[in-house]
Image: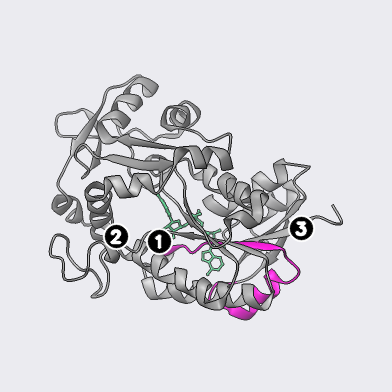
């Protein structure tokens, strides 16, 4: 324990970072210790992590000095931003810059940055197939993360760029679960036609990140995509029907219709689903199931995720 290396985990009270903290703490022989970073060390979630054995420290992603202090003495850090708290791409980039600069100041030996594709590399702003949003983006919550990769590279921080995937937990927490349509039947709605979606159990992101820290130096400077499965909407609906014992249909809409749903971020997500669909091959190929499983042997596929979490999926009946 004394000689173990500290991993400072941003987002420790959330899905990605929480998974990493729990993965480190679950492995007594890991040689790592978990330092959970939160804005509220007295909060319930922080207290739960402390009880599990994590050190808890306060820092704010908008405050570079607080991050430098929180990273001090650590071997590595897991860095993640939460777009959905502010819907401001420039803030994600500036928070990534703060983490990269703090990692540099603390001379960290390994940073894992949770990122996504900058979709503008394949769909330039001049491309009319999907609307440009906020004047500068196609999929704001993707593009800002992709743009922020440069913050770590330019700071010269030893970084692994972790491309995450769609959380199946969105069927539980993000309002994407099966809903009753006008025909009275349950359906999941996605504008993805027959394309396969790269998805993952949120808990597996942290477990894969843990695998990256354990495997160490070989991942520095690399981009690695992770997913638990690549499953079409029709297949997800069929698997849900079996798991839930109730028929769930797949309601295919166009990206235009999805963008028009009107909830905050609907246009961003409509563009995201269109990108997943039109670049299905590139998106799924960037997320190897074999690599993901080699990082995390407990990786869930969609059916095993359903078996574990089906009772938490809210059903509007
Ligand atoms: N949903 C999906 O399918 C999906 C897929 C891929 C990627 N993502 C990305 O995942 C990211 C969110 O990660 P998550 O799901 O793990 O988040 P989450 O469960 O919503 O939790 C957010 C975490 O971020 C921390 N945080 C937010 N702002 C902070 C700040 N200013 N200073 C310090 N900590 C801050 C929070 O810590 P405290 O509140 O304790 O301070 C909390 O631990 C988003 O950017 C999203 O785009 C989502």
Q: Are marks 1 and 3 in contact (CB under 8 Å)?
A: no
**Left or right of 174 in this view: 98:** right
Is residue 158 in view?
yes
- Residue 33 lies, in percent from the top left, at 75, 54
Element at badge 3?
A: strand
Estimate the x, y position of residue 58 in percent, counting from the top left. Answer: 66, 68
Which one is earlier in the sequence, the residue at label 1 or at label 3?
3
Answer few, some or many: residues within 10 Å of disc 3's Cα (few below 14, many 20 plus, some between 14 and 19): some
Query: Separation of disc 3 and disc 2 at Cα?
Result: 39 Å
In this picture, is 66 found above or below 247?
A: below
Residue located beneath label 2 in the image: 265
The picture places residue 312, in percent across and down from the top left corner, at 45, 34
Q: Is residue 80 magenta?
A: yes
Asked if marks 1 and 2 touch (Cβ < 8 Å), the reply is yes
Which mark lies nearer to you, 1 or 3? 3
Q: In the rendering, which numbered label is found on residue 317?
A: none
Q: Residues within 10 Å of mark 2 (few under 14, many from 20)?
A: some
Task: Specify the segment rendered in magenta.
Answer: 60-83
Q: Earlier in the sequence, mark 3 or mark 2?
A: 3
- Is 38 in front, or is 180? 38
- Residue at the spot 39% in from the left edge and 49% down from the top edge: 286
The residue identified by callout 3 is 5
The residue depicted at 15 percent of the width and 66 percent of the height is 127
Q: Position of residue 46 (x, y in %)?
A: 66, 56
* Residue receiving disc 1: 84
Q: Is mark 1 within 8 Å of ligand 1?
A: yes
């Amino acid at each position: 324990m004394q000689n173990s290396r500290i991993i400072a985990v941003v987002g420790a009270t959330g899905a990605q970072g929480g998974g990493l903290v729990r993965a480190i703490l679950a492995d007594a022989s890991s040689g790592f210790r978990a330092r959970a970073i939160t804005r509220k060390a007295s909060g319930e979630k922080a207290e739960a992590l402390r009880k599990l054995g994590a050190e808890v420290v306060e820092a704010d992603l908008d405050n570079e000095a607080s991050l430098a202090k929180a990273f001090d003495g650590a071997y590595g850090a897991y860095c993640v931003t939460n777009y959905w708290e502010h819907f401001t791409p420039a803030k994600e980039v500036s928070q990534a810059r703060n983490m990269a600069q703090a990692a540099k100041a603390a001379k960290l030996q390994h940073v894992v940055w949770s990122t996504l594709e900058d979709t503008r590399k394949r769909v330039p702003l001049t491309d009319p197939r999907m609307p440009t949003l906020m004047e500068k983006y196609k999929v704001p919550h993707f593009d800002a993360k992709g743009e922020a990769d440069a913050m770590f590279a330019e700071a010269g921080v030893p970084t692994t760029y972790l491309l995450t995937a769609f959380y199946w937990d969105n069927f539980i927490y993000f309002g994407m679960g099966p809903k009753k349509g006008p025909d009275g039947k349950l359906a999941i709605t996605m504008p993805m036609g027959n394309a396969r979606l790269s998805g993952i159990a949120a808990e597996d992101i942290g477990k894969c990140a843990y695998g990256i820290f354990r495997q160490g130096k070989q991942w520095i400077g690399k981009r690695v995509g992770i997913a638990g499965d690549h499953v079409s909407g029709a297949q997800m609906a069929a698997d849900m029907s079996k798991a839930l014992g109730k028929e769930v249909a797949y309601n295919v809409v166009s990206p235009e219709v999805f963008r028009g749903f009107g909830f905050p971020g609907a246009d961003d997500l409509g563009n995201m689903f269109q990108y997943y669909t039109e670049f299905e091959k590139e998106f799924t190929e960037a997320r190897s199931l074999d690599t993901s499983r080699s990082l995390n042997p407990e990786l869930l596929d969609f059916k095993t995720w359903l078996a574990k979490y089906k009772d938490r999926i809210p059903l509007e009946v």
